[in-house]
Image: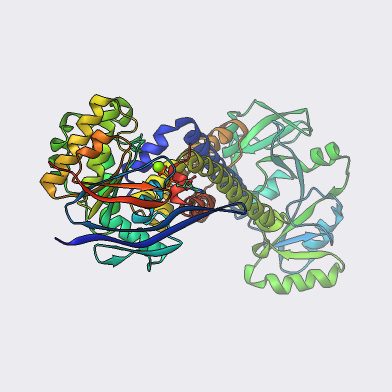
């Protein structure tokens, strides 16, 4: 399919070909890395939230699900919630989102009373003990593995405060770092407050009735069912979708422009050769196809390199910063379509120009 | 003998700004199959213009051209390209080989374009032509690795390989020294004899013209001496 002329032409100008290939690869990388990150973080969060056993999440109105650090709910609600018929347990939680310990990405920390929280969610310590003191935390297995830190180790939270790891728990659920509720209240200077209260029902099928009872007894608060929480980052970060689509559009433009420039200089340089093709009887379609094939070959190489770089970069970033990348087929296809489509489209104008050249003046071109 | 090219009262006027340049002022010519025709005349008399008209690279301002029973002047742009693909082979003064392709690659490209969508090239024919032109050991060389004479022989091979109805050559020895000119002209003659290949060749060189079967002289866009038959 790719005749020798196409391959030979690319080899003729290796630097230009490489620059064009890199341009396409850049576009592909942009799409792959950003969408892979969004998806990876979203799935990671979803996995951890799915271990939540409580049916109801009780918060102040205006609190935004699980993505903010609001600490404005009085813990006296806990007792009142436990008094409501059908409620088995109520556990207060402070969720705090801080900058990642390496200054990149976000990291969540939760303050909970370990025993009731662990009992409610079926978690156990596989090493060490529960957090008690003001500078103690427990972490989940994944965090222990990724950060290569275990019992007796130290991690930094809230900027640069050092906390001692006193236990490692499993399975993962919610934030990967947990300290006692009191320690968190102390650190955030929010005594007797929490972010939300997790409510476990005696009978999960009764959750709607119980929610109505809670609303009647404690009106004016926000009651959500955990199985309805939107835990998808793509939905809970406003405009992330728009951002990703804009990115994809820009990547397409980058690929198209790079290839267009390359093919434009190519046809200018090869004006006389195009004249010869015409003298040999090559049709407009043939000339367009020769140039398009060259552009597609460049785009294809860019695509392959773009994918390779994305995977390697994703892996390295994951190892260095703990950010999770998950590449989806649909985004990979989008990236491929952008690389090839952008290249093909970018080459179209130069190709049409070449096809439209006057053969006699093309043949006398110096 | 069959008439393979018929030109009737061809006129070509170029417009340069507001000035009309009358490059051809009524040229009529019949070329028979198997002819080897030299066109001579001073620079600027319209020889290249005439050749480009025959090859369908240009359209005449007036007049008619019929090539191998196909009316070039009644054809659309795309049809003219198609007639050129099937019936014409060009040889230029500047060789115009594809620098990135070997001699054989240049021939294969011509074959591929000639064949259109249907069919691949004919390796046997390529070898036969390259051997006749004494290029068999240069088959895999790139143009820049060959002498001018060799390059022009490859260009001739490229034109001949698809067995066109007519080969149009515009000063094919204009860039060659005497020795290489003689070799290339011999090859033209060889193609004419062996394949009964019709050739129209522009030349400034009387010795080159003397190797043709027929010479026409042009001046100021007109044929002034048609049909000088060379005595062989
Ligand atoms: N593209 C063009 N535009 C304007 N004038 C042209 C063009 N091509 C050729 N001419 C003029 O037409 C005349 C014939 O040119 P040409 O056919 O190239 O002559 P020859 O090949 O015999 O030297 C010359 O006067 C030349 O200047
Ligand atoms: Mg000329």
Residue placed furthest toward the front = B224
Q: Residue B180: horizontal and vertical position, in percent? A: 24, 27
Foreground pick, B5 / A230: B5
Q: Residue A91: horizontal and vertical position, in percent? A: 74, 53
Q: Quadrant of residue B133?
A: top left
B102 to the left or right of A83:
left
Foreground pick, A324 / A334: A334
Q: Residue B173: horizontal and vertical position, in percent? A: 30, 34
A224 to the left or right of B41:
right
In the rendered view, tell whether residue A309 sits above or below residue A281. above
| Residue A48 in view of the camera | no
B129 to the left or right of A123:
left
In the rendered view, tell whether residue B67 sits above or below residue B34. below
Q: Which of the colour schemes (rainbow, by chain, secondary structure, one colour) is used?
A: rainbow
Q: Residue B132: horizontal and vertical position, in percent? A: 13, 37
Query: Ligand 2 appears in which quadrant?
Result: top left
The number of numbered discs placed on residues in the rendered structure image is 0
Residue at 78% from the left image edge and 34% from the top image edge = A158
In the rendered view, tell whether residue B61 sits above or below residue A313. below
Foreground pick, A321 / B88: B88
A102 to the left or right of B59:
right
| Residue A47 in view of the camera | yes
Residue at 83% from the left image edge and 36% from the top image edge = A187
Q: Quadrant of residue A128?
A: top right
In the rendered view, tell whether residue A248 sits above or below residue A322. below
Residue at 22% from the left image edge and 60% from the top image edge = B4
Foreground pick, B77 / B225: B225
């Amino acid at each position: 399919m790719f005749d020798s002329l196409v391959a030979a032409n690319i080899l003729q100008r290796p630097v230009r070909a490489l620059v064009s290939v890199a341009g396409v690869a850049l576009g592909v990388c942009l799409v792959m890395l950003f969408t892979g990150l969004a998806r990876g973080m979203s799935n990671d969060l979803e996995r951890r939230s799915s271990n939540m056993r409580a049916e109801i999440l009780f918060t102040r109105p205006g609190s935004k699900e699980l993505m903010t650090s609001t600490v404005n709910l009085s813990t006296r609600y806990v007792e009142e919630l436990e008094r409501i018929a059908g409620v088995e347990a109520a556990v207060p939680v402070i969720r705090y989102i801080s900058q990642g310990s390496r200054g990149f990405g976000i990291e969540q920390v939760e303050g909970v009373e370990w025993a009731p929280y662990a009992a409610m969610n079926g978690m156990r310590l596989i090493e060490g003990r529960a957090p008690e003191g003001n500078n103690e935390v427990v972490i989940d297995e994944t965090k222990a593995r990724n950060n290569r830190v275990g019992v007796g180790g130290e991690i930094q939270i809230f900027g640069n405060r050092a906390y001692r790891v006193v236990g490692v728990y499993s399975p993962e659920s919610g934030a990967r770092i947990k300290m006692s509720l009191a320690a968190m209240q102390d650190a955030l200077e929010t005594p007797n407050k929490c972010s939300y209260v997790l409510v476990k029902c005696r009978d999960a099928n009764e959750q709607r009735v119980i929610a109505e009872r809670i609303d009647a007894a404690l009106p004016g608060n926000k009651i959500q069912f955990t199985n309805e929480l939107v835990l998808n980052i793509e939905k809970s970060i406003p405009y992330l979708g728009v951002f990703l689509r804009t990115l994809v559009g820009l990547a397409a433009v980058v690929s198209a422009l790079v290839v267009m420039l390359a093919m434009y200089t190519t046809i200018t340089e090869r004006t006389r050769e195009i004249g010869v093709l015409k003298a040999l009887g090559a049709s407009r379609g043939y000339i367009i196809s020769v140039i398009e094939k060259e552009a597609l070959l460049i785009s294809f190489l860019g695509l392959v390199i773009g994918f390779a770089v994305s995977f390697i970069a994703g892996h390295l970033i994951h190892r260095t910063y703990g950010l999770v990348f998950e590449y989806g087929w649909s985004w990979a296809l989008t990236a491929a379509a952008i690389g090839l489509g952008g290249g093909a489209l970018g080459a179209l104008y130069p190709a049409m120009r070449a096809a439209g050249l006057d053969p006699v003046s093309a043949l006398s071109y110096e | 003998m069959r008439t393979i090219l018929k030109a009737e009262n061809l006129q070509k006027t170029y417009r340069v700004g507001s000035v009309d340049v009358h490059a051809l002022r009524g040229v009529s010519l019949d070329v028979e199959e198997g002819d080897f025709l030299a066109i001579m005349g001073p620079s600027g008399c319209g020889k290249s213009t005439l050749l480009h008209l025959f090859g369908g690279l240009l359209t005449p301002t007036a007049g008619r051209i019929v090539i191998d029973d196909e009316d070039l002047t009644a054809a659309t742009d795309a049809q003219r390209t198609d007639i050129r693909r099937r019936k014409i082979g060009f040889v230029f003064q500047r060789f115009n080989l594809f620098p990135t392709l070997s001699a054989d690659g240049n021939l294969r490209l011509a074959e591929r374009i000639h064949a259109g969508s249907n069919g691949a090239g004919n390796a046997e024919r390529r070898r036969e032509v390259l051997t006749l032109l004494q290029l068999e050991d240069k088959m895999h060389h790139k143009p820049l690795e060959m002498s001018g004479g060799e390059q022009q022989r490859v260009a001739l091979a490229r034109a001949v390989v698809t067995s066109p109805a007519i080969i149009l050559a515009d000063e094919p020895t204009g860039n060659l020294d005497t020795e290489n000119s003689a070799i290339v002209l011999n090859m033209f003659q060889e193609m004419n004899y062996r394949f009964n290949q019709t050739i129209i060749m522009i030349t400034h060189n009387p010795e080159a013209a003397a190797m043709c079967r027929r010479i026409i002289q042009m001046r100021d866009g007109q044929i002034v001496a048609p049909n000088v038959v060379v005595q062989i």
